[in-house]
Image (cartoon, helix red, strand yellow):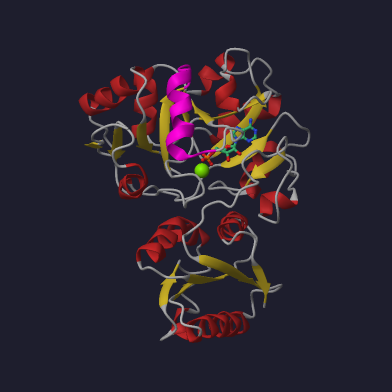
Amino acid sequence: MVAETLILRINPLKPERDLVRVAAAILKEGGLVAFPTETVYGLGAVASRRDAVLRIFRVKGRPPDNPLILHLASPDWLPSVSREIPEVAYRLAERLWPGPLTLILHRSESVLDEVTAGLPKVAVRVPAHPVALSLIEEVGEPVAAPSANKSGRPSPTRAEHVLEDFKGEIEAVIDSGDTLHGVESTIVDVTQSPPVLLRPGALPVEDIERVAGVKLVIPPFARGLGEADRALAPGTRYRHYAPRAEMVVVELEDYSELSRLARVVREIALSKKASGLRVGVLCSDETASFYEGVGVVRSLGPRSNMFIVARNLFAALRDLDREGVDFIVAEGFEERGLGLTVMNRLRKAAGFKVIRG
Ligand code: AMP
Ligand code: MG
């Protein structure tokens, strides 16, 4: 427990050097600093400090078998964390870093067991956010960071979300406004051939396949359909991204039948309302008008722009919590491009409770 959490307001486009130095100094002393990335806010610790890394697990309430991602300031740092880097990793790193892509590589000895949760592989990425990059550069070594939320909660897309979860428990949070993507990085295990998608994220699978020149293996757990073997995808076994309310997702085979989707969502919402619950609906611009009078309605955006939908998702879940809803009915989205990412998060947030419309 720390008495007060320092809030550092840093310009996301032109990070003030003196403020970045303050944050870097806290990290170097073994403190925890939440910082913005282009995906979500991360909860950082210097990756070589066991005490600091262990504190991340403690304050998050994170199971010790769920490893962290190493954030590097440059791909040039790769040899310090892995000595076996396949050709495809270099190709992806060269074209897609800095960016929302996390690569799983064989770890080198120097990486702490606590960071990889004892696994032989390590997760790494170079974030595309000026504040994150200058912070890591200033620290001068890899920064371990999971998302800056209590374990199981929706990931934070603004500093205010970080403070909701960690006020008084971490040394500092950097406030640089809303994050760009609003969902986490895409995780690809490049130690396997063909590479395996472990988590869909802000970078669409199709973009990665184009650069890699191969189709990725997409296991069912990456779509948010049930839980994976721990050795394959640690951290996928828990309910994740979850609002306080109970939640279901209504899915269709074919999303050209939007009025059918809206009818089913509305029916479920009304029956929950009739049983005395305060209901929230997560929908799209196309269908929002169907839900008048049903409860707290939040549109994630137009189906034609899944970037917007993904970007709004976690903030909308936290918003429905603040509204005090007891039950959330969410519309499903087509699993293409960022739709795969959105469906992974929705299914997990719902604890895998899916209704076929
Ligand atoms: P978060 O940024 O909070 O989503 O947490 C980092 C994610 O990276 C976790 O969900 C892990 O599943 C994933 N991850 C980290 N290291 C590894 C690894 N060695 N193998 C597979 N997944 C990993
Ligand atoms: Mg997380």
Residue 227, horizontal then vertical, whole percent: 70, 50
Q: Is residue 186 left or right of residue 18?
A: right
Q: Is residue 55 magenta?
A: yes
Give coordinates of residue 31: x percent, y percent.
Answer: 35, 24
Can I make out residue 73 in this image? no
> Which part of the image, by quadrant, shows the C terminus?
bottom right
Q: Is residue 46 left or right of residue 13?
A: right
Residue under the image location 68 percent in, 39 percent down: 233
Up-down: is 310 above or below 203? below
* Residue at the (56%, 24%) spot, across then down: 114
* Ligand 1 position by quadrant: top right
Task: Based on the picture, tell me whether residue 215 belongs to the magenta stretch.
Answer: no
- Please report the residue visible at 53 percent of the width from the left and 66 percent of the height from the top: 246
Q: Magenta segment, which residues?
A: 47-62
Question: Whole-percent x and y of residue 27?
Answer: 35, 23
- Taking the view exactly as shown, the residue that stands out farthest to the right is 193
From the image, give the main secondary structure of the stretch colored magenta. Answer: helix
Residue 44 picture location, percent across and down? 41, 30
